[in-house]
Image (spheres, rainbow, N blue to C red):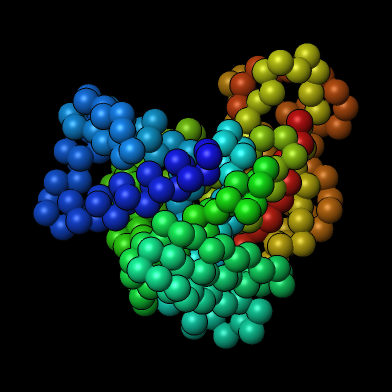
C-alpha cells in the first residue's frame, strides 16, 4: 500500500538520521549514489539527493498541530508537537497514544477545529511519544483505514530548509516563517487545485499548475482556520510577480490576471505570506 511505504520509510530514515546527526554523519547517510531495493531502502554517496528528497516535505511551522497534504500519493498527515499540545491550554487539542503490544500502538489527536484523527498501527515504534518528540499520524486519503504512527526526534534538524540558521533556514520572518525568498527549496507546503493548507501566516506556499489545462483562473480562498485578518502576501510565477491580501473567511483573492479565465501561464505560483506568524488557512483553485 502506498501509505505504508511512504510513512514507514520516513520513520526509519528520520530516526536513523537523528542518530547519525549525533555522530556527525547525517550528510553522508542522505547522500545519493547507491540505492538498495529491499524491504528497507537506503542511500550512500554525496549530497545530490538533498533537494529532491526534502523538496515537498513541509517544515513544522503551525504548532502544536499541523496538517500536511501530499496529493501526489493521496496522503495526508497530522504533525503534533507533544509538549506544545500539553501546554497550549486549549481543551479541544490533545494527543494520546497507548501501546497495545511491542509493535502495535493506537494514537489519537484532537484539533482546535474540534475534529479527531485516530490510528491503530501494527508496525508502530516500540516507544511511546515522550516530551520533546514530534508525533505524526499519516493517512491514505483514498482509504483512511490505512494509516501509520511515526515518532520523530530532532525534527527539522535533518531537513536543511527547516533549520533555524544557514541556507534556507527560518530567517527573521517570524517563528518558523522560512526564508525571505519563496521558491521550490523554501516552500513549506505544496497545493494542487482544490487542496487546503493550514500553515504559519509568514510561510512560503507552492501552488501547482495544471499544465494540461488550456485556460485557468487561479485564486486562493481564505478559510475559518485563519486566526486574524488581513493577511498580506506576495507571489511570483515564471513571467511576473504581484501582491494580494486574504481579507476574510470564504473571500476569494484572484491571482495573476484577476477574476476571469485566461490562457494557462504554464508554471507554478509561489506565495510568500506576509503575516505575523499566526495560523492561516486557505484553499487554492486554478
Q: Quadrant of residue 37?
A: top left
Q: Position of residue 225 (x, y in %)?
A: 71, 62
Residue in the picture at 31% in, 39% down: 40
Q: Is residue 232 left or right of residue 260?
A: left
Residue in the picture at 45% in, 48% down: 7
> Given the current orientation, which residue lies at the most extreme right position?
260
Image vertical order of residue 226 relative to residue 84, above or below: above
- Quadrant where the C terminus is found in the figure: top right
Q: Does the rendering let one see residue 163?
A: no
Q: Position of residue 171 (x, y in %)?
A: 39, 52
Q: Nearer the viewer, residue 155 or 152?
A: 152
Q: Position of residue 22 (x, y in %)?
A: 16, 58
Q: Nearer the viewer, residue 267 or 155?
A: 155
Q: Does the rendering let one see residue 2?
A: yes
Image vertical order of residue 46 relative to residue 272, above or below: above
Q: Quadrant of residue 272?
A: top right
Residue in the picture at 32% in, 62% down: 153
Q: Position of residue 197 (x, y in %)?
A: 64, 50
> Given the current orientation, which residue lies at the most extreme front position?
101
Q: Is residue 229 left or right of residue 55?
A: right
Q: Quadrant of residue 47?
A: top left
Q: Nearer the viewer, residue 106 or 70?
A: 106
Residue in the picture at 61% in, 21% down: 267
Amino acid at each position: 500500500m502506498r501509505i505504508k511505504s511512504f510513512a514507514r520509510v520516513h520513520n526509519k530514515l528520520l530516526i536513523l538520521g537523528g542518530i547519525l546527526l549525533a555522530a556527525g554523519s547525517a550528510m553522508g547517510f542522505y547522500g545519493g549514489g547507491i540505492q538498495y531495493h529491499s524491504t528497507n531502502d537506503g542511500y550512500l554517496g554525496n549530497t545530490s539527493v538533498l533537494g529532491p528528497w526534502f523538496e515537498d516535505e513541509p517544515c513544522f511551522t503551525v504548532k502544536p498541530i499541523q496538517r500536511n497534504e501530499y496529493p501526489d500519493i493521496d496522503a495526508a498527515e497530522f504533525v503534533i508537537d507533544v509538549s506544545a499540545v500539553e501546554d497550549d491550554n486549549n481543551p479541544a487539542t490533545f494527543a494520546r497514544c497507548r501501546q497495545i503490544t511491542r509493535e502495535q500502538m493506537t494514537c489519537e489527536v484532537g484539533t482546535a477545529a474540534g475534529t479527531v484523527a485516530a490510528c491503530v498501527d501494527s508496525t508502530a515504534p516500540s516507544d511511546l511519544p515522550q516530551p520533546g518528540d514530534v508525533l505524526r499520524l499519516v493517512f491514505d486519503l483514498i482509504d483512511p483505514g490505512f494509516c501509520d504512527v511515526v515518532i520523530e526526534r530532532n525534527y527539522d534538524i535533518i531537513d536543511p530548509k527547516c533549520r533555524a540558521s544557514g541556507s534556507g533556514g527560518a530567517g527573521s520572518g517570524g517563528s518558523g516563517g522560512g526564508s525571505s525568498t519563496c521558491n521550490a527549496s523554501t516552500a513549506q507546503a505544496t497545493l494542487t487545485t482544490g487542496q487546503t493548507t493550514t500553515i504559519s501566516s509568514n510561510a512560503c506556499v507552492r501552488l501547482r499548475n495544471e499544465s494540461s489545462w488550456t485556460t485557468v483562473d487561479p485564486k486562493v480562498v481564505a478559510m475559518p482556520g485563519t486566526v486574524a485578518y488581513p493577511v498580506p502576501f506576495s507571489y511570483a510565477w515564471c513571467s511576473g510577480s504581484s501582491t494580494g491580501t486574504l481579507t476574510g473567511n470564504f473571500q476569494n483573492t484572484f491571482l495573476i490576471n484577476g477574476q476571469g479565465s485566461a490562457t494557462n501561464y504554464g508554471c507554478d505560483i509561489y506565495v510568500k505570506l506576509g503575516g505575523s506568524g499566526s495560523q492561516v488557512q486557505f484553499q487554492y483553485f486554478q
